Image (spheres, rainbow, N blue to C red):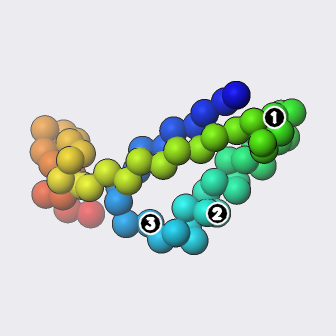
Amino acid sequence: MPIVIIEMWKGRTDEQKAKLIKGITRAFEEIGVEAKHLSVIIHDIPKSNWGMNGEQASKLSQ
């Protein structure tokens, strides 16, 4: 049973997450994996807990 883990910054809506899960599921179905055998886990990580270039992502300009 495949498990897809997505780590992304916190802030996406439930609707955006649902669309992402559906899209990933479709991609796996295209390669022969049934949806019932796929798990998708989304980790919403606050920008203050994500480091880039030696800084917290929350401190970097967008």
Q: Earlier in the sequence, mark 1 or mark 2?
A: 2
**Residue at image point 78% right, 49% down:** 26
Q: Position of residue 11 (x, y in %)?
A: 37, 66
Q: Which disc is residue 19 wearing? A: 2
Q: Earlier in the sequence, mark 2 or mark 3?
A: 3
Circle 1 — which element?
loop
Measure the alpha-carbon separation of dots 2 and 3.
11 Å
Measure the alpha-carbon separation of dots 1 and 2.
18 Å
| Depicted 51 relative to depicted 59: above or below | above
Circle 3 — which element?
loop
Locate residue 38 relative to residue 58 in the image: left or right: right
Q: Position of residue 49 (x, y in %)?
A: 20, 47
Q: Which disc is residue 41 wearing? A: none
Circle 2 — which element?
helix
What amino acid does circle 1 point to?
Val
What amino acid does circle 3 point to?
Arg
Which residue is the extreme one toward the top? 1
Neighbour class for label 1 at 10 Å: few (<14), some, many (≥20)? Answer: some
Q: Pointer 3 and pointer 1: residues touching (CB < 8 Å)?
A: no
Residue ID for mark 1? 33
